[in-house]
Image (cartoon, grey):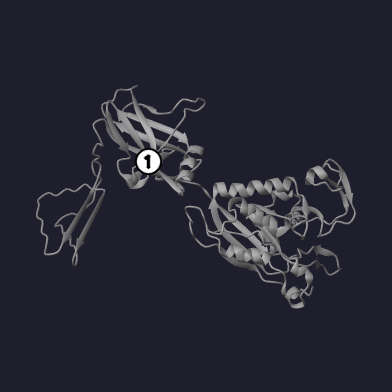
Amino acid sequence: MAGGTITRVASGGFTSHSETYLENFNEITHSAGTKVVYNAEEQHYVGNWEEIPAGTHFIKGWWTDDKDKPIKKAYIGDTIRFHLETKDIKDGEEVNFTVYDWDGMLNLDDKLNLIIKGTSNPYNKITIKGNKGIIEWTTGSGTQKLIDEEGDAEVELYVSCSYKGEVIELPYNMDDYLIIFEKEVLITVIIELPHSYYTIFNDPVSALGMAGHSAMAIGERYFDYGPNNTPGTYSENEYDVDFNNDGDKNDNVFLDRPSYKNSPGQPWWGTHIANRKKIKPEQVTLDMALKHIQLSWKDVQDVNGNIIHYGTYIYGEVHKIEFYVKEHEANKMLKWWEERYKHLKIYSAYPWRGEQCTTTVKTAIQEAFPFNIIRGNNIPDTTQKPSGLLEDLRAFTSTSKEHLGQLAKVSVIKKEATDFKG
């Protein structure tokens, strides 16, 4: 065997004398009532132990990345290699192999079916040369399916190898099985609360949630939604809306009085940022949005009264909420936003007419986390305002392996403006 465990318990006493004493173990634990003392007159050292063959024809097996660097963890989508070292197997001979996901002590290990690239044939043989062989593949849907079927965050892979009736599972030590899991993606939600001025004066705009804003980023890609109140001609096809109610979505329609109650949608802060930087809204990043928020909320003029900076009109307190999700969960949100940016549809403060900033962020997140009262990460369909979304997200936890179960991080990134008077 390649290793093992030795445990020594000393209660009454333990004494050992030897001219030469050699231990080769993968793990060793010494327990004593008081203390353990090692003494050597000349040297005391730990050296590399001799590799003990795992079987008659098999010495060892180990996992690496595609650069042959030994690994114990990998992401879905990574290219990985399993290396096999053998004994007394002639060049050109083949070893049969099967890759399994270890299920612990249940003995219900699931097989991972590999297919030779460009064919429908199983990939289950290693050709030996110089008593060495390699399996290589890029992890993908098959590994993801095993993770999903287990309802777990990861799989632990080992390889069952057989040659001339000898069958052995490698790597020999279970600690060296390869753990594979999804990449994580940081979700950042940005919420501007209505300025306290509106609360003080009970302004109806605040009741509609119009005085705040909700936005989000998936990784570095930033998205948000707001009204386009500019009179003009709008494409029904582009917005996926029958503006003139003639039964089709093929016309270019002039809208002379769009408003927050019923207007073509557009990225909100995203459009403002894009205009400043002369880029497209879909090119706006999280970093750009965070820097934009810190700018002055009102216009800045030079000594001659010329405007040198147009205000952002972000005058409420701004919160940032961060949590991590699995890559496939992030992709569901991303797909929703990409489709929304293709068809911006109708913006309305009234939910029965269209969507607004908070409902778009809510709906995108619900793509990955549909409302389910018996589990966490819920946003009720009734959530309509930035303040409500903020409270919902305070209870969110990360779902990625690296941050699993950690509560969402909430921070204030900008205080409300003290010079705003409505």
Where's residue 182, x and y in %?
50, 47
Residue type at tag 1: Asp
Q: Position of 30 compared to 222: left or right?
A: left
Tell me the quarter of the picture where residue 191 sits: bottom right
State the SS at label 1: loop
Instruction: Give the quarter of the figure containing the N terminus.
Output: top left
Q: Residues within 10 Å of mark 1 (few under 14, many from 20)?
A: some
Residue 343 position within the rendered picture, expressed as x and y whole percent measured from the top left: 75, 46
Place of residue 325 in the rendered image (x, y in percent of width and height, measured from the top left):
54, 53
Compare residues 80 and 229 and report the one nearer the observer.
Answer: 229
Q: Is residue 266 above or below residue 293?
A: above
Quarter of the rendering occupied by the C terminus: bottom right
Residue 3, by quadrant, is: top left
Taking 320 as reference, is 66 above or below it?
above
Drawn side of residue 66 relative to residue 91, left or right: right
Residue of label 1 = 109
- Residue 168 found in image quarter: top left
The residue most toward the bottom is 200
Compared across the picture, whether 270 is left or right of 116 comes to right
Whole-percent x, y for residue 244 in the image: 87, 47
Tell how many labels.
1
Q: Residue at x 82, y 44 (%)?
A: 236
- Give left or right: position of 301 versus 181: right
